[in-house]
Amino acid sequence: MPSKRAVGFSLVLGVVHALGLLLVADTLGYSIGPSQYSFAGLLWRSGGLVVVAAVPVWLAVRFRLGIPVIALILTTAYVLGMELTPPGPTFRDVAELERLAEPTGITVVENGLYIVRYMVNASVWTVGFLFLGLVEYVVRNAWILLPSVPESIPWLSTPAPRRRGIAIASSGGLLHAAVMVWYAARLGATMSGGLDWLLSLFGAVGMWVLAAIPLYLLVRHRLIAPATLLTAFVLVDVQAAFTASVEDPHALYFGGWFLYLAVLLVVAGLEYGLRRLDMYRRFASET
């Protein structure tokens, strides 16, 4: 599909996706109307639901990449399934929970908020879907057993030259860092002693490194496992927000990123070693 038509088609489906989820949320009784947010807040939330669907759809219709749109369908189906199947969301006043005599006007939602959390965290989901698309793109152009992408991107040919690989990895790292720093701030990640700025700086640098290294290995050396695992980290991290808990996994992801980096480097080493071993066996068999 031509580029402009693909963008228009993707945006239309993104709007349908957003309106459908907002309609369900309004039917269930969530307070998500325009009066509940500022204009910027409303644009961020509703626009997020548009973009989180438009990006995978665009990858599908423009480059025939199927994994991101499958992930979108599964995620949206999960959100709707959790909201629409029993027990469903229950709205209770804090006074009922605390056994107070007078209602407080503060409502607690049990067994719900899936659509609301999906909407608020749409930017993190978008990054995960985008990384899925990049991994599928490289895999399909690298493995002869899979059909190649019909319309390859000239500047994303792999293995990419060193400078181009650094540029792509750095851009992906910046995107990952920006979204994850915002996500940590939204969740209230803090550090004792009033050193929140130090945690933010440490986490921001780590989020860039954590994404840039596996993305460089993907586009420069076609090492698939590290970038695939990074994508899984992102999606598992944001999926945990559906069931709010005191033990927030993003605090470990953001503050202990070096642990995740160590895992990615080990996986990269294993994949590289297995690939070299396979090349050696092929060479030995031919000689």
Image (cartoon, rainbow, N blue to C red):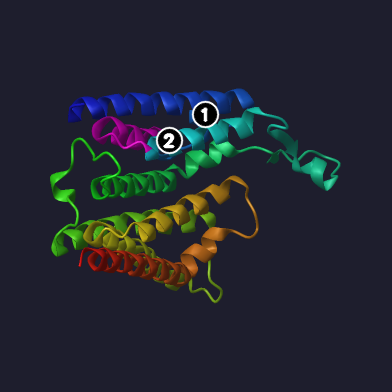
Read off the residue under disc 1: 33
User: Residue 139, percent across and down?
Assistant: 30, 49
Quarter of the picture holding the N terminus: top left
Left or right relative to 5: residue 13: right
Left or right relative to 244: residue 20: left
The residue under the point 56% across, 35% down is 79
User: Residue 72, percent across and down?
Assistant: 44, 36
Amino acid type at image mark 1: Gly
Read off the residue under disc 2: 70
Q: Earlier in the sequence, mark 2 or mark 1?
A: 1
Is residue 187 visible in the rendered image? The answer is yes
Q: In this view, does 20 lie above or below 124?
A: above
Q: Is mark 1 on a helix, strand or loop?
A: loop
Is residue 189 visible in the rendered image? The answer is no
The residue under the point 46% across, 33% down is 73
Q: Quadrant of residue 176?
A: bottom left
Most foreground residue, 53 or 184: 53
Q: What element carries label 2?
A: helix
